[in-house]
Amino acid sequence: MKRSIVCRCEDISEEDVIQAINEGYTDIEELRKKLRIGMGPCQGRVCIQLVARILENKTGKKVATIPRPTVRPPLIPVSLGTLASEKDEK
Amino acid sequence: MKSKADVVIIGGGVNGCSLAYKLSKKGFNVVVVEKKYLTSGATGACGAGIRQQWSTRENTSLAIQSVKMFEQLSHELGQDIEFRQGGYLIAVHDEKEMNQAEKNVSMQRSLGLKVDILQPEKIPDVVPILDVKGMKAIGATFCPTDGHANPFKTTFAYADAARNFGAEINTHTTVVNLKTSKKALRAVITDKGTIETDVVVNAAGIASKVIAEMVNIKLPLTPFRKEIMATERLQPLFEAMVISFKDGIYFSQQKEGQIVGGIPIPEEKGGYKTMPTIAFLEHMAHTITRYAPVLKHVNLLRHWTGFYDVTPDARPILGEVKEIKGFLQCNGFSGHGFMISPMVSQLLTNFIAEGKTSEVLESLTLERFKGKNIEKELSVVG
């Protein structure tokens, strides 16, 4: 079966997003919590723009007016060992 | 939006949606009003744990009955809420904690809960990655029927089921005011219109205090910011939630494989600030790698904040307030709203549908804070 991948971290396709929108999840935060888009290592860098575009197509809301999910630190994955050693040195 | 309802629920978290489901199933005309989106408050930020090991009899009993309902919930709602029972392992660090643990366990057993005190050498049998020396444990308590569920899926499943029974759920809708007359609730005024109703349930999490102030009811709620983190996904390593009251840490591995956990920030005070801090990350990383050294090789992906709406005795405020007929509270969960939500919504449904109150419901009304002897829940973590 042909699938267009939207979220590589969580393996979510365009079809999955469209289905969730059809089920009534029309807020990016709700889609995120339903499908886990943006919860992987890239934190939504790849998928959120695409999801916003799909939402525009489905709901007519303009991409620019769709609120984006809160950006959560850290910007890139950091090992717990690195974070723990920071405290050891103090 | 409907202009009339039997019951208006303010707040689209797990408790609001669970109550909407139970009331609409009984034939009530229910409207939910949520300021942002479903699970946007404490429900969506929570650690997903479901625990029955408490220090007060009421909380233990509520939790035991809630677990029985969680066991049936995926089937009942027709959607998988990812409920799984891997147990809760509570580390015990010194004699004083051991005395309290023994007291708790004997009370919990008297309510029929299966719970054991473990010798330190038995701890890795339950969670193999734990280092007993590093965590400075002299033992632990373990209840195998404690567990987890997915807070998003649970709330969405309740909301879908409620809609199927005719409930109307309005997200991105803000309550502006409440209308009363003759000491009774009459209407909820929102930014999208007014809904006439005789019953309003205030399930708005930390915003519950603001809602209650609209009708001059003071709720003793203090918002406490909590931070929580998630790692990358891993193969299954352990099933239990690990917690310590002394260190305040809790962590567990979720179904998808990520480890989720939190710890209080040492210098944190009450307030509405939401920014996550580096201090938390360092403290959490330091403590979790002391408990489970192997985790130092694991990447942290993100961390976020959520709020505990804390009451003076760390127990929820439920039921009708004395001053205004039809104004019900469903807040003050102090960090454990998700895990007792099945019973909370059941108690409130019994009250709204049949006028039935109960000893537990009576013991959790706002009235209790007017008395002098409140029993504080001691088994609080995070």
Image: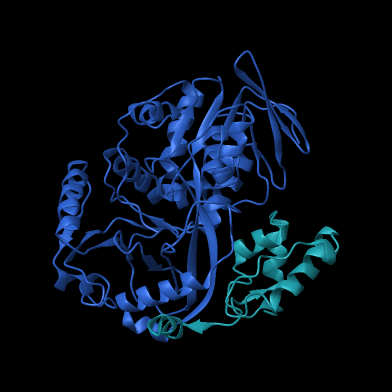
Chain colours: A cyan, B blue
Give above or below for B179 relative to B102.
Answer: above
Is residue A6 visible in the rendered image? The answer is yes
Residue B208 position within the rendered picture, expressed as x and y whole percent measured from the top left: 57, 39
Give above or below for B296 relative to B230.
Answer: below
| Count of numbered marks | 0
Give above or below for B276 relative to B186.
Answer: below
Of all residues, the one furthest to the top in this rendering is B182
Residue A28 position within the rendered picture, expressed as x and y whole percent measured from the top left: 70, 62
Asked where in the image residue B47 lies, by quadrant, the reply is bottom left
- Image point 48% across, 55% down: which residue? B269
Asked where in the image residue B166 lies, by quadrant, the reply is top right
Residue A60 position within the rendered picture, expressed as x and y whole percent measured from the top left: 86, 59
- The quadrant of the rendering that contains the C terminus of chain B is bottom left
- Image point 44% across, 79% down: which residue? B234
- The quadrant of the rendering that contains the N terminus of chain B is top right
Camera-nearest residue between A85 and B196: A85
- Image point 53% across, 52% down: which residue? B42
- Image point 55% across, 39% down: which residue? B203
Of all residues, the one furthest to the front in this rendering is A90
Is residue A3 visible in the rendered image? The answer is no
Residue B228 position within the rendered picture, expressed as x and y whole percent measured from the top left: 48, 65
